[in-house]
Amino acid sequence: MLPKVIEDLIYFYLGRFEVGSNLPSLKVIRRLVKKSNHDIAKRYIGELYPEHTISTGNVINLRSVFQQPQTIICFYNALVMSTNICRQTSVLRWLLKNELASEPVYMKELLKSYLIRIIHDVHP
């Protein structure tokens, strides 16, 4: 029989391995972030400039978004619509509520998402 401290340590590490084995791959997270950001950018630019078509390379500078009230409202509307309609954005929001956000490697990838950066109040 092992001392209680050693047993607790073993069970702690077994729990960490179990959590780690259930985590999605980083490639999946990157793909979710990319598709979610594209959907948010498409909705944001579409609301600001209805006649503008978006390419997959468009990137939103969040600092410029928060300089004018009109752009803040448009960006908020884009986030809400994307969260309600885009499956990838909804999944990112759900992942943030789970233990995935406590893993530094995953949080680094999640912070590339417009949605997660706004939730965490992180601006580029």
Image: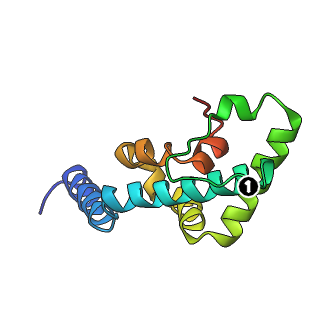
**Disc 1 designates what residue?**
46
The residue under the point 61% across, 53% down is: 54
Secondary structure beneath dot 1 equals helix
User: Pointer 1: residues within 10 angstroms few (<14), some, or many (20+)?
Assistant: some
Amino acid type at image mark 1: Gly
Q: Nearer the viewer, residue 73 or 11?
A: 73
Q: Quadrant of the C terminus?
A: top right
Q: Position of residue 34 (x, y in %)?
A: 47, 54
Please name the residue shown 48% across and 55% down the image: 33
Q: Residue at x 53, y 48 (%)?
A: 113
In the image, is residue 123 above or below residue 42? above
Q: Give the quarter of the figure containing the N terminus.
A: bottom left
Which one is nearer the viewer's eye here, 47 or 98?
Answer: 47
Which quadrant of the view contains residue 66? top right
* Residue situated in front as seen by the camera: 108 or 30: 30
Q: Residue at x 59, y 60 (%)?
A: 93
Where, by quadrant of the figure, is residue 118 drawn? top right
31 on left or right of 42: left
Where in the figure is residue 82, as x and y percent of width and height? Answer: 67, 63
